[in-house]
Amino acid sequence: MMRLVKGLAILLSIVCFTSGAFAHASLVSTEPSDGSMMSQAPKTVRLRFNEPVTPAAIKLIDGEGRTRDDALVSAHDDIIEIGLPDDLPHGAQFISYRVFSADGHPVGGSLAFSVGMPAGKAIARTEGDSGLAPLIWLTRIGVYLGLFAGVGGVFFCAWIARTSADSIVIVAALMVGLLSAVASLGLQGLDLLDLPPSDILTSPPWKAAAATSLFQSLLIAMAAMAVAMVARRVGSVRALSAAAIVGVGLSLAASGHASTAPPPWLTRPMVFLHGVGVAFWIGALTPLVAMAWRPAGALLPVLNRFSRVAIPVVGALALTGLGLATVQLQSFRALIETRYGLILSIKLALVVVLLGLAALNRFRLTPALALDLSDARPMVRSILAECVLGVAILAVVAGWCFTPPPRALVTAIATPLAIHIHTETAMFQVLISPGTVGTDSFALQLMNGDASPLAAKEAMLALSLPERGIEPLERKATLGTDGYWHVADVPIPYPGRWHLRIDALVTDFKKITLEDEFDAKPR
């Protein structure tokens, strides 16, 4: 079992904390486009995302390298508008943005355009690059322990075991959950504003976090855990424990990937039921272990009551889990081709093992205990293994906070991929639609170094994939009425880092060649 836990930890570190965390809302388009060159500065810059977002930090750096504080920022659903000042100098202008999406997660990046001279490419940034990812992951696990092991344990003791919830593990889980919820809120604010951990004692990160849906979720979670703490000490323990476990479902449905997935009238109730079911199951484990060390005559009736209720609960967990996975993945291939799907695959594998142990308890160990009440050791070992698997599952699920579901990436993948290439003598803008494996279309804008149109007699596109030994695939471009050179129906059979070359024949004796690379992603 220790080898399983160590292997899981290593795999999680690879899945969650390497190569930067992905954003949870996707930038769909910008006006002006990234890397564009303009003779006059625009009045506004528009960033359009695939879902409603709220600005957290927007910075304008002008052509002289000054950070401006006179840009006006407004948000309208999925569009962020930045009103630019009238006195922008010539040169490369940078818009550095950091927003948070409907599920409470931050996304950041930069847009570059130029006034009067060529601009460089955008400087991409991603969330979680300030070293907060491990802390965010740990606090998320802590919140889950408080909700599932703590609140679920109090509910189990009140309704199934019919005894007091005096287990030190339950009390510790509730305390850890409350502290983790507070810490998680502060870390969320630091992540939103891209601040170092030392700023957690200042007010800006807490104010920023309070504007997100995670704030509501954590408030409900803390209320549920506080009610569970009170339920341990008062006479109306059943009513309070029932209210607390309802709070578990409400907390999970208030924020996160699944709660923001369309249609919300279906996904939010599924998240609620799934969360309550997990709390019931995980919450039963530590009280059962504690009871197993007592006389077996008291354990057997509790096991029988738990087994009768657990069967419909497991059925509800399976149905809601399947429904949510279908909404989030949108295709079976996403299960093995995305990090979200990989985490789900690990979770499902662990759940299968957990179900196997539950079946062993139900159909073999419980009848054996009924025949011999003096030996509960096999049952204790099995339930302890379930506890380890339960914590492992929570650790895996906590990794989802760094990884967007495939459904959130569909819009971003479907939009054209823009590439800007320039030298002192020429500048080419390339739009690749959709920029994924399959059949793609290319639009080429050919310009001189001063951004004036480049008059070419012919244009040729060549693609190669050196890592797979694919030699250049050449296609002749056709000049359209829009002034762009177009190449349609270009096959891109494999994902990977493709090499792109554009040859523009200016005269019979002069040819301009520019090269770059782009990533073709799986469809």
Image (tube, grey):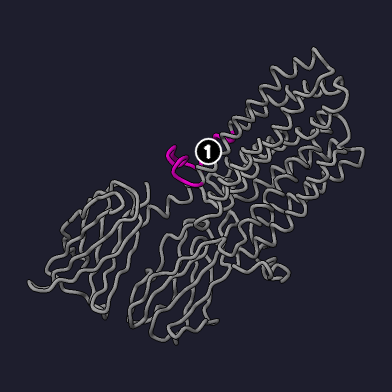
The stretch of residues the image draws in magenta is 320-339
The answer to if 327 sits in the magenta stretch is yes
| Image height of 395 relative to 303, above or below | below
| Image height of 322 relative to 261, above or below | above
Q: Position of residue 485 (x, y in %)?
A: 20, 63
Task: Tell me the residue at 37%/51% (across/down).
Answer: 521
Q: Is residue 420 left or right of residue 462?
A: right
Name the kind of residue labelled 1 in the image.
Ser
> Residue pushed farthest top?
371
Q: Position of residue 50 (x, y in %)?
A: 47, 56
Q: Position of residue 438 (x, y in %)?
A: 30, 47
Task: Tell me the residue at 80%/15% (across/down).
Answer: 370
Q: Position of residue 208 (x, y in %)?
A: 65, 66
Disc 1 designates what residue? 345
Residue 41 picture quarter? bottom left
> Residue pushed farthest front?
3
Residue 130 picture quarter? bottom right
| Image height of 488 relative to 165, above or below | below
| Image height of 328 relative to 361, above or below | below
